[in-house]
Image (cartoon, grey):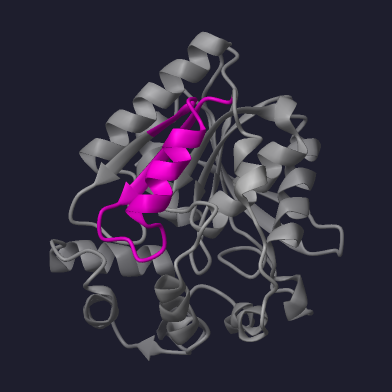
Amino acid sequence: MAEWTDGYWQSADGLRLHYRDYAGGADGRPPILCIPGLTRNARDFEGVAARLAGDWRVLCVDLRGRGGSDKAPDPATYNPLVYLQDVQRLVAELGLARIVLFGTSLGGLVSLLFANAARAQAAGLLLNDVGPVIEEAGLATIRAYVGRYESWPTWSHAGRALKEAQGDRYPDWSIDQWIAHAKRACRLNASGNIVFDYDMAIAEPLKAPAPAVDLWPAFDALAGIPALLVRGALSDILSRATAEEMVRRNRDLESVTVPGVGHAPMLDEPEAVAGIDHLLERVARAG
């Protein structure tokens, strides 16, 4: 596993936020900034970082309320626009002129917003199993499990519980893969029990009716930026029809589908690896 250093920055409302910094990119390549999904954290990108670090600097953030970042006192700040502001402050603090954005699910939406707000800084973009249209069936599944407190006595118990709850997402995983998944998504609490590594209050904004937002204009504005869409073939968040429409509308977007995987691919699958490598080749060529 590649080594990293822990970094911290402060949000506009005074939260101490955490990121992992994997060294690399001494030849002037732009850093890769990885933004995880709703209930996940920087550990989700361990495999990506281990493979790319050295050639590329890889920064993996914990959004507020996740991992090593502070919980927000106001749950209303658990929303994409505030996450965007948090990420913008990190990029500014590190003095990064350009970055490659890797975003999974919610992190993909934040990446999309970042590229729209600061197009000149977006050297490349990976959207992992997310697009301008989010399927209602997938949203219903998310609302059903997010914010439900659970705990387990051992990592084996946690892995088996996640397999029972999410087995349709990764039907071919071994129990060892599920335990590894638990170690990415969970943590040991002060009582020695294993719990999810996020603030249960992130579920609060999901309970209120949200106004419909048309994200197609934001997506269309990405034209000209080297981009990759990774979709899980079994995804209930990103439909095949939406993925095909994204590719039709943006000639700079390449797309790969990971067979036998739902929401969301881990980005270590052969199809995702090949797509990422080609995206980064395009970024490097573009300078």
Magenta stretch encompasses residue 239: yes
| Quadrant that contains the N terminus | top left
Q: Is residue 262 left or right of residue 10?
A: left
User: 194 or 48, which lies in front?
Assistant: 48
Q: Is residue 195 visible?
A: yes
Tell me the quarter of the picture where residue 274 sits.
Answer: top left
User: 246 or 60, which lies in front?
Assistant: 246
User: 266 or 47, which lies in front?
Assistant: 266
Q: Residue at x 44, y 23 (%)?
A: 280
Q: Is residue 2 visible?
A: no
Tell me the quarter of the picture where residue 117 sits.
Answer: top right
Magenta span covers which residues?
Answer: 225-254
Q: Residue at x 35, y 66 (%)?
A: 236
**Where's residue 259, x and y in %?**
19, 50
Q: How many marks?
A: 0
**Where's residue 141, x and y in %?**
41, 79
**Where's residue 231, x and y in %?**
34, 49
| Quadrant that contains the C terminus | top right
Q: Is residue 4 above or below residue 141?
A: above
Q: Residue at x 62, y 77 (%)?
A: 202
Q: Residue at x 73, y 79 (%)?
A: 75
Magenta stretch encompasses residue 114: no
User: 184 or 121, which lies in front?
Assistant: 121
Q: Is residue 71 above or below residue 21?
A: below
Q: Is residue 226 left or right of residue 51?
A: right
Q: Is residue 35 left or right of residue 120?
A: left
Q: Is residue 232 left or right of residue 202?
A: left
**Where's residue 161, x and y in %?**
26, 83
Q: Is residue 167 above or below residue 256?
A: below
